[in-house]
Image (cartoon, grey):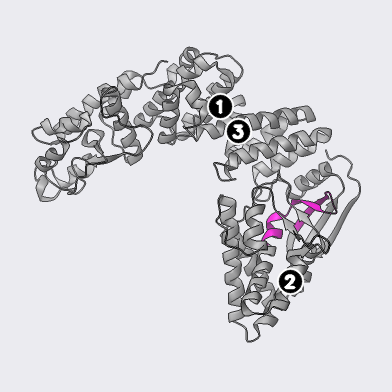
């Protein structure tokens, strides 16, 4: 139910006039600039079509504003349209400056883009984006300087500037009176590109308006809907929720695209309440988080979990070093395997287990992940369901140790016999997986050797012993067999980065000379094999399978 909404003003305005008439700020807790090239292009094409058709107006949607300090307004909904429109206007200014029409350019600058304070002579932009975006936006758009983007949002702003510049050039190239054509565009944007401006006196009511206007039927980010829902129900605790949300968003966006925030929230929620699909997430959270204290608690929990989530994507994070080398190696391995379905379980483990149990559990999760990947028995949905349901038991403290984690899961895990059989017959299409398996086995075989294979970098090359297209040097193996066998794990090895197999299709006798120079035992031993046949591939793969069972153990 909506609460009472007081002092609300709704009126139509041209988006250009809105930009020129207000000092608009995007609050820190709002998402970064999100429009892609297609959305920018669609906006400008639609305006172009409306101008050519001499349309009386073009409707851009709704803008929700709420008062801020110093006669400014915060934009709760509509920042993408406002920022994109300003980027186009700035490119018109830049065109005029380049043409030498400084007077018109500065008129546009003062009216739409930025004004100088007559007392301090400081420049104040009409539109200010959030803390992450604004320094780049200020340089690239407001000041038109060459600024290197450092985030995905910055790149999107740079792309928008490029697209807008191309539109300005097209407008002028297609007109005998380019200045008049640009003025026609500015007039249309100023008066006929209409938005419904909703001015709401209370921030909490603004979030209610935002939710009702979007009503979950429009293409709106789940993160945006959730943020506004939490802000709305937090009431007198709004500042706490905003601070926690801003901190969480900054952490996640430091390593991920803004779109990944919804994945992070889903993983956190699944870690507590079991597998939750994206389409269910918003409704499930609304069912459980219903009051201001719960809004505060959940926002703080998201912020705390964000630190662990970011650490999962950075094996060099001090958190892992403090837990020891085995834990750090496990995080490196999980990153290399590129499997995200385990993240809800890992988040639950980090939240609930003691440090000693974390050290036992995370390497075990690597083993489970490898076993599922090799066997192909757990599709992404099966894996995520298993890990999320187990995470729920960890969160409720039904599972409190690595041993209990194994006992609760053992019935669904590939047994040693099943894993060995699958490994003995596995073909691996993804080179990064094959490299990981072989590098792990090689390191396990020779842990104290002078030559240590780093598990943390791509410092070894993947080598197909029998090439995909063998040619005349491999007359003992048919082209059909080569196609079927060249990705078998037994046919793969890893080469020291200092060595180079120059002739990919060289004969096995020629390759053996190079293998003999390798410091990696599983590669050097190939020089002792008399002939490379399908049987030899199978024999080697069986040997690797025996080692894999010992390396990737089921138990902690």
Residue ranking furthest to the front: 120
- Density class for disc 2 (Cα within 10 Å; few <14, some 14-19, many ≥20) is many
Residue 396 higher or lower than 226, as above or below = above
Could you say which is closer to the camera, residue 452 or residue 270? 452
What residue did someone put label 3 on? Answer: 306
- Tell me whether the residue at label 1 lies in contact with that at label 3, contact meaning CB atoms closer than 8 angstroms: no
What residue did someone put label 1 on? Answer: 347
Give the mark nearest the N terminus, 3 or 2.
2
Give the mark toward the camera: 1 or 3.
Answer: 3
Tell me the magenta residue range.
62-84
What residue did someone put label 2 on? Answer: 108
Q: Report the Cα–Cα distance between label 1 and label 2.
A: 51 Å
Q: Report the Cα–Cα distance between label 1 and label 3.
A: 10 Å
Res. 262 visible in picture:
no
Quarter of the view holding residue 247:
top right
Residue 59 higher or lower than 4, as above or below = below
- Density class for disc 1 (Cα within 10 Å; few <14, some 14-19, many ≥20) is many
- Tell me whether the residue at label 1 lies in contact with that at label 2, contact meaning CB atoms closer than 8 angstroms: no
Q: Position of residue 467 (x, y in %)?
A: 19, 45
Of helix, strand and loop, which one carries label 2? helix
Residue 499 higher or lower than 417, as above or below = below
Q: Residue 415 colored magenta?
A: no
**What residue lies at 59% left-to-right and 43% top-to-bottom?**
253
Of helix, strand and loop, which one carries label 3? helix
**What residue lies at 69% left-to-right and 49% top-to-bottom?**
130
Q: Report the Cα–Cα distance between label 3 and label 2.
A: 42 Å
**What residue lies at 81% left-to-right and 53% top-to-bottom?**
73
Q: Position of residue 315 (x, y in %)?
A: 47, 32
Q: Tell me the quarter of the image containing the C terminus.
A: top left
């Amino acid at each position: 139910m909506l609460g009472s909404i007081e002092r609300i003003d709704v009126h139509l305005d041209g988006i250009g006039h809105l930009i020129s008439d207000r000092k608009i700020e995007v609050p820190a807790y709002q998402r970064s600039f999100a429009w892609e090239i297609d959305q920018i292009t669609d906006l400008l094409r639609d305006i172009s079509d409306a101008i050519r058709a001499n349309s009386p107006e073009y409707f851009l949607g709704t803008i929700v504003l709420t008062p801020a300090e110093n006669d400014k307004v915060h934009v709760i909904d509509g920042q993408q349209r406002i920022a994109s429109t300003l980027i186009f206007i700035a490119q018109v200014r830049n065109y005029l400056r380049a043409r030498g029409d400084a007077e018109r350019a500065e008129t546009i600058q003062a009216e739409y883009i930025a004004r100088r304070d007559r007392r301090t002579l400081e420049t104040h932009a009409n539109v200010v984006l959030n803390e992450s975006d604004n320094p780049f936006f200020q340089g690239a758009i407001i000041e038109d300087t060459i600024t290197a983007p450092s985030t995905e949002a910055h790149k999107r702003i740079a792309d928008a500037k490029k697209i807008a510049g191309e539109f300005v050039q097209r407008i002028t190239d297609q007109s005998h009176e380019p200045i008049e054509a640009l003025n026609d565009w500015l007039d249309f944007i100023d008066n006929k590109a209409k938005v419904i401006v909703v001015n709401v006196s209370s921030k909490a009511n603004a979030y209610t308006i935002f939710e009702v206007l979007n009503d979950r039927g429009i293409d709106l980010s789940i993160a945006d809907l959730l943020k506004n829902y939490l802000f709305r129900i937090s009431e007198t605790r709004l500042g706490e929720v905003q601070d926690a949300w801003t901190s969480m968003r900054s952490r996640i966006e430091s390593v991920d695209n803004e779109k990944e925030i919804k994945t992070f929230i889903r993983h956190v929620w699944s870690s507590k309440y079991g597998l939750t699909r994206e389409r269910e997430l918003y409704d499930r959270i609304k069912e459980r988080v219903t009051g201001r204290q719960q809004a505060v608690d959940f926002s703080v929990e998201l912020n705390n979990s964000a630190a662990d989530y970011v650490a999962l994507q950075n094996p060099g994070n001090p958190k892992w070093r403090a837990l020891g080398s085995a834990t750090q190696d496990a995080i490196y391995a999980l990153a290399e395997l590129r499997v995200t379905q385990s993240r809800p379980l890992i988040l639950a483990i980090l939240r609930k287990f003691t440090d000693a149990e974390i050290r036992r559990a995370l390497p075990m999760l690597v083993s489970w992940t490898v076993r599922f990947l090799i066997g192909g028995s757990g599709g992404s949905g099966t894996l995520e369901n298993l890990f999320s349901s187990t995470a729920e038991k960890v969160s409720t403290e039904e599972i409190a140790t690595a041993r209990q984690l194994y006992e609760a899961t053992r019935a669904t895990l590939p047994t040693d016999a099943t894993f060995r059989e699958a490994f003995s017959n596995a073909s691996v299409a993804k080179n990064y997986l094959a490299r990981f398996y072989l590098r792990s086995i090689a390191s396990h075989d020779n842990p104290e050797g002078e030559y240590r294979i780093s598990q943390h970098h791509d410092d070894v090359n993947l080598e197909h012993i029998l090439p995909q297209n063998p040619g005349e040097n491999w007359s003992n193996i048919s082209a059909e067999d080569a196609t079927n066998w060249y990705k078998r794990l037994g046919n793969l090895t890893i080469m020291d980065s200092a060595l180079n197999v120059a002739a990919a299709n060289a004969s096995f006798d020629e390759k053996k000379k190079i293998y003999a120079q390798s410091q990696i035992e599983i590669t050097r031993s190939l020089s002792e094999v008399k002939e490379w046949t399908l049987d030899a591939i199978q024999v080697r793969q069986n040997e690797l399978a025996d080692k894999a069972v010992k390396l990737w153990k089921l138990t902690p």
